[in-house]
Image (cartoon, rainbow, N blue to C red):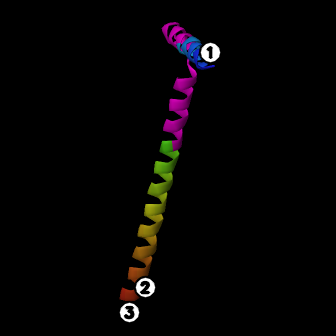
Amino acid sequence: MTNRRDAQASILAARDVLAELEGRRTPTDVAIANAARAQAIATAAVAQALLALGDTISAQHNVRTTP
């Protein structure tokens, strides 16, 4: 069974190489693009949370220092 799996993996790898040579997107390209999108979304969410935290801290500071 190992030989069959190795052969199948080799065929899939060859298909990916051929697709790249022909300029088509491969499953790996799609996975990388999806991961990059997910990372961008997560980064934006963290930035938004930090801005909200900054606003909260600023508002609390203003409440304490306002006579």
The amino acid type of the residue labelled 2 equals Val
Residue under the point 58% across and 23% down: 27
Residue extending farthest to the bottom is: 67
Whether tag 3 and tag 1 are in contact, CB under 8 A, the answer is no
Q: Which of marks 3 and 1 is nearer the N terminus?
A: 1
Residue 63 is labelled as 2
- List the residue tagged with mark 1: 4
Position of the C terminus, as image quadrant, is bottom left
Residue under the point 52% across and 37% down: 35
Is residue 45 positioned above or below 59 on the image? above
The amino acid type of the residue labelled 1 equals Arg
Q: In which quarter of the image is residue 1?
A: top right
Indicate the position of residue 65 as horizontal and vertical percent values: 36, 87
Residue 67 is labelled as 3
The amino acid type of the residue labelled 3 equals Pro
Is disc 2 placed on a helix, strand or loop? helix
In-front residue for pair 63/28:
28
Q: Which of marks 1 and 2 is nearer the N terminus?
A: 1
Q: Which of marks 3 and 1 is in front?
A: 1
